Image: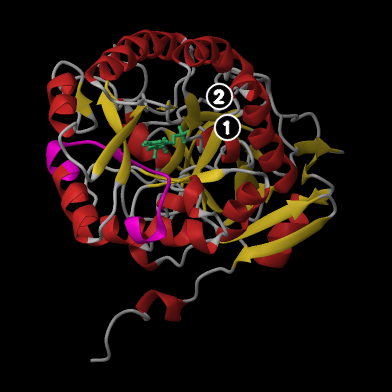
Amino acid sequence: MDHFTYRNRVLHCDEVPVPVLAEKYGTPLYVYSRKTLVHHLKAIQTAFKAVDPLVCYSIKTNGNLHIARLMVEGGAGCDVTSGGELFRALKAGCSADKIVFAGAGKTDAEIRTALEHNVFLFNVESEGELSAIAEIAKSMGRVANVALRVNPDLPPKTHAKTDTSVKGVKFGLDIDTVLEFAQNVLKNPHIKVVGLHMHLGSPIITVEPYRQGMVKGLVLIDKLRRQGHQITVWNMGGGFGIHYKKNEALPASAFAEVIVPAIQESGCRIVLEPGRFIVGNAGLLVSRVIYTKDSGGKHFVIQDAAMNDLIRPTLYDSFHRIWPVAPAQNFAPPEDFQIENPGTKKCDVVGPVCESGDFLAKDRYLPPMTRGELLATFSAGAYGMAMASNYNGRPRAAEVLVDGGEHHLIRRRETFDDLIRPELEC
Ligand code: LLP
C-alpha cells in the first residue's frame, strides 16, 4: 500500500499532483508520503503485536529528522550505526532507552557517548569491541547491556553486498565459536549479555531465511542461558523486502507468522530494526528529462537525477519502477515493468554524471519521452537520499513530505555554496 496514484493520467502523492511539487521545489526531488510512512510502521507494530515488539526504525535508511520524528511519534525507537546516527536519533526526540547501537566498528568515542546517554543495547560484533565496551563502561562505573550479534551462516538470500548472514562477511560473531566467546564474558562485571541479535540481510523477500534463523536462534538462546546468561531480548534486525519490480513483497504478517512463535517459545522480548519496509515505498524520486538521444544502437533518456541522487541501480543492479509523471493517453503504468508494452520504447534512463555507471534503469520500456517531461522513480525512499552524494559537483536534491493536500519542504535543495562550505578559506 502506498499513496502514489495516477488520477486523470497525472501522478499524485495523496491529493497533490506531482507536477505541482516539481514546479514549486524543482528537480531532482524526493517526495515522501506521510500517510504511507505511518501506515508501514503501524503494519509492523500490528503484525507483531502478540509479542509486544520494540520496533527500532533503522535510521540509516532515511535519516531526515522529519521522518525520524514521525517514527518516534508513532512509538518507534531507533537502530543507529554511528555517533552521527545516535546524534540524529536523539535530535528526532527518540529516548535513549529505545535506541539500539549496531555496527562492526564502534569507536571508543561512540561507545562512550552511547553509554553516557544510556542506550538500551549495544549489538556487539567482535571480541575487541566487547573489551572496548567493558573497559569504557568500567572507567565510567557502569554496566553495559549487550546483545551478541551472531552470523547464523545461512544460504545466500539477497545481493552479495547486503547479505549479512553468510559465512565470510564482516558481520557478527561466528556461530561456531560464539559460545566460547560468551563463556568468557560471564566473568566481566561491566558487561551484561541480555540478548541475541541476528540481522540477516536486506532486502529479503521470502520468509525462509527467517525460519532458518529462528531455529538456530532458539538453540543458541538455550545454550547461552545454560551458560548463565539471562537472555531476555531477541533482536531480529530488519530486512523485510518491498515492492521494487511489481507486487513481489510479503506483508509484515507473513514474517510475523514465522518469527512470533519462536519469540514466544524463547520467552524473549523482540526487537526489530526495519528501515526499508517503512520508508522504501513511501518515497519517489522525481526528475525532468533534459535530452533524449540515440547512440550505438541504444535510445537514451537523459534526465536530471543521477547516481549521486540514487546509487542503488549501479551499486546493486537494483530495479526501480520508472514511469512518466504525466504520461500521454493510453500509457497507464503497466502491471509488469519488465515486459514490453505496445507503443513503448526500449531505453536507458541515465543522468548527467560522467560515468557509464550513471543510470537509473537499463533496457527499460517507456513511452516516448521528450525534453522537459517529468519521470518518477518509485520505491526510492529507502537508501536513496541517505546514500546521496555531491559527486560531480551536484548539490543534493530537496525532500518534500506530503500529507493529504499539504506539502512541506523537509530538506532544502543544497546550493553551490553548500558544496564548498566545509572547505577552509584558501
Ligand atoms: N539492522 C541492521 C543491523 C542493518 O545492517 C540494517 C541494514 C537494518 C537493520 C535495516 O535493514 P532494512 O529493514 O532497511 O532492510 N544500501 C542497501 C541496503 C543496506 C542495508 C544495510 N543494513 C540498499 O540500498 O539496498
Answer yes or no: is residue 306 visible. no
Measuring from the top left, give residue 361's x and y in whole percent: 47, 36
Residue 2: which quarter of the image? top right
**Mark 1 → mark 2, Cα distance in angstroms:** 6 Å
Of 348 and 420, which appears nearest the observer? Answer: 420
Measuring from the top left, give residue 156's x and y in whole percent: 30, 15
> Is residue 118 rendered magenta in the image?
yes
Q: In this view, does 273 lie above or below 89?
A: above
Q: Is residue 231 above or below residue 107?
A: above
Mark 2 CB near ligand 1 (8 Å cut): no
If you read the primary sequence from the N terminus, does the residue marked by circle 1 or circle 2 appear first? 2
Q: In which quarter of the image is ligand 1?
A: top left
Amino acid type of the residue tagged 1 in the rendering: Arg
Query: What element does badge 1 sit on?
Result: loop
Residue 179: which quarter of the image? top left
- Residue shown at 46%/22% (left/top)? 268
Of 412 and 58, which appears nearest the observer? Answer: 58
Mark seen at residue 245: 2
Query: What element does badge 2 sit on?
Result: loop
- Residue shown at 76%/59% (left/top)? 407
Q: Quadrant of the N terminus?
A: top right
Tell me if mark 2 has few (under 14), some (14-19) or many (20+) residues whose alpha carbon lies within 10 angstroms of its own.
some
- Residue shown at 61%/55% (left/top)? 69
Of 59 and 186, which appears nearest the observer? Answer: 186
Tell me if mark 1 has few (under 14), some (14-19) or many (20+) residues whose alpha carbon lies within 10 angstroms of its own.
many
Measuring from the top left, give residue 301's x and y in whole percent: 52, 44
Report whether 334 appears left or right of 275. right
Measuring from the top left, give residue 30's x and y in whole percent: 59, 53
Q: What stretch is highlighted in magenta?
A: 115-130
Amino acid type of the residue tagged 2 in the rendering: Lys
Mark seen at residue 321: 1
- Residue shown at 77%/36% (left/top)? 5
